[in-house]
Image: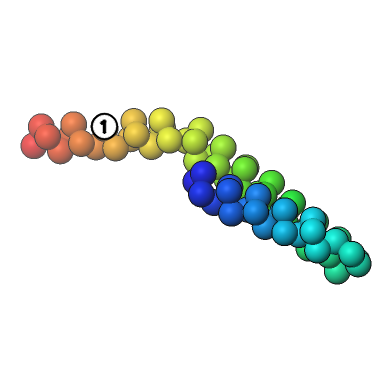
Amino acid sequence: MRELLDKLNLLIIKAFTAVKSEKGQALVEYALLIVLIAIVVYLMVKGSGRQVNCVWSTINSALGDV
């Protein structure tokens, strides 16, 4: 996930250097939206990781008893 954020940061840096017209401005806005969405997805996955681990542990112990 860290590599994805690094690539998105690089995209933002390139976009800021290309800001010379409204096209560049739109590119920056899209890049910022992508970064925001990536951060939200990362936090959602990180937050639900424990619950998924708990479910898999429950399934694993149930199968171990068979």
Can residue 28 be seen by looking at this rendering? no
Does residue 40 appear left or right of residue 63 in this picture?
A: right
Q: Would residue 44 appear left or right of 35 to someone viewing this image?
A: left
31 versus 24 height, above or below: above
Q: Position of residue 1 (x, y in %)?
A: 49, 46
**Is 13 in front, or is 37?**
13
Most foreground residue, 60 or 3: 3
Residue 14: image location, x then y, percent: 72, 59
Residue under the point 26% across and 32% down: 58
Instruction: Name which residue lies at 29% across and 37% down.
Output: 56
Q: Residue furthest left?
A: 66
Residue 25 visible in the displayed image: yes
* Up/down of 42 relative to 7, above or below: above
In the picture, measured across the screen, residue 2 lies left or right of residue 20, that is left
Q: Residue at x 72, y 53 (%)?
A: 13
Instruction: Identify which residue, 4 or 65, lies in the foreground.
Output: 4
Q: Secondary structure at mark 1?
A: helix
Instruction: Determine the residue located farthest toward the right in the rendered image.
Output: 21
Mark 1 surroundings: few (<14), some (14-19) or many (≥20) residues within 10 A: few
Q: Quadrant of the C terminus?
A: top left
Q: Quadrant of residue 54?
A: top left
Q: Is residue 66 left or right of residue 51?
A: left
> Residue type at mark 1?
Thr
User: Which residue extends farthest front?
Assistant: 17
Residue 36's place in the image compared with 31, above or below, is above
User: In the rendered picture of this protein, how many numbered marks are placed on residues?
Assistant: 1
Q: Which residue, given by chain and number where applicable, does mark 1 sit on?
A: 58
Picture coordinates of residue 40, whole percent (x, y): 62, 42
Model colouring: rainbow
* Quarter occupied by residue 39: top right
**Residue at figure coordinates x 65%, y 50% from the top left:** 9
